[in-house]
Every structure is written in C-alpha cells, then in structure tokens.
Amino acid sequence: MNSPKCPACGSGAVEKLNQAKRVTTFVGAIASGVTGYTAATAGAVSAAELGAGVGAFAGPLGLIAGSAIGGLAGGVLGFIAGATGGAITGAALGEQIDKHILNNCRCTSCGRRFSA
C-alpha cells in the first residue's frame, strides 16, 4: 500500500495517529475483561469446589487454600480471556473509525491533519 501524501504540501512525511484505535482497544479490553471476570467468578463456585476437593487431601488448610486459589484463578483467567477478545474487537472498530470518520493522518512537515 502506498504511503499517503499531504494534500497541502505534497510531503510524504506523514504519520498515522490511530487515536480511535487506541481508545477503543483500551475500552474494549477493560470492559470485556471485567465482564469475563464477573462471569468467571459467578461460575467460581464450581472452581472453588474443585479446588477444595483437590486441597482436601492436604487437610483443613488445604481445603481453604484450594477453594480460594480455584476461585481466584477462574476470575483471572476469565479477565484475561475477556480482555483479549475485547481488545481485538475494539481495535477493529477503532481502525474503521480512524479510516472513515477521523482525520487520521498528520503531515510532519506542515502539520496538516487529513484523512487518507
């Protein structure tokens, strides 16, 4: 793909700003991560039960530790899975906003902002 040229001065020294892509990637990752964490901790009862079952072999302390670790691990994995999906979706949305709505390019020679 050819690099865009500034419509004002014709310079090829153009940078893409990608502002919408950055914002929507961040928002998508956080929102989906929290959703994933919430969904995982709602299902953490089964993870805690599994952890408690494994920890029961170590006695009462193992039962408590296994339960806590099982629930926490489920929540963390839910957050990571949700955040990954949300970041990918947010980046795709932001890329389209940058491409079709915002003036995503800036000439480093004259400072003009324009859309490619």
Image (cartoon, rainbow, N blue to C red):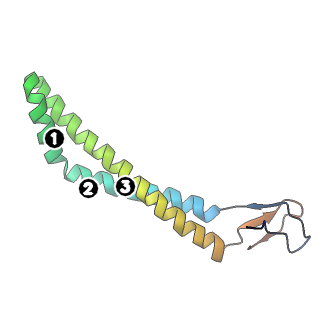
Q: Residue 11 appears at what percent x and percent y?
A: 89, 65
Identified at 56% across, 60% down, the residue is: 23
How far apart are labels 2 and 3 at the CA level? 10 Å
Amino acid at the residue labelled 3: Gly
Task: Give the SS element for disc 1.
Answer: helix
Res 113 quadrant in image = bottom right
Identified at 22% across, 41% down, the residue is: 71
The residue to which callout 3 is attached is 82
Compared across the picture, whether 45 is left or right of 85 comes to left
Tag 1 or tag 2, which sits nearer the N-term?
Answer: 2
Identified at 38% across, 48% down, the residue is: 80
Task: Give the SS element for disc 2.
Answer: helix
Residue 53 in view, yes or no: yes
Task: Give the SS element for disc 3.
Answer: helix
The residue to which callout 2 is attached is 39
Q: Residue 74 appears at what percent x and percent y?
A: 26, 44
Q: Are marks 2 and 3 in contact (CB under 8 Å)?
A: yes
Compared across the picture, whether 22 is left or right of 81 comes to right
Amino acid at the residue labelled 1: Ala
How far apart are labels 3 and 1 at the CA level? 20 Å
Compared across the picture, whether 34 is left or right of 21 comes to left
The disc placed on residue 111 is none
The residue to which callout 1 is attached is 48
Tag 3 or tag 2, which sits nearer the N-term?
Answer: 2
Res 29 quadrant in image = bottom left
Q: Residue 52 appears at what percent x and percent y?
A: 11, 35
Q: Residue 81 appears at what percent x and percent y?
A: 36, 52
Residue that extends furthest to the front in the rendered view of this protein: 1
- Image vertical order of residue 68 relative to residue 106, above or below: above
Mark 2 is surrounded, within 10 Å at the Cα level, by few (under 14), some (14 to 19) or many (20 or more) other residues, namely some
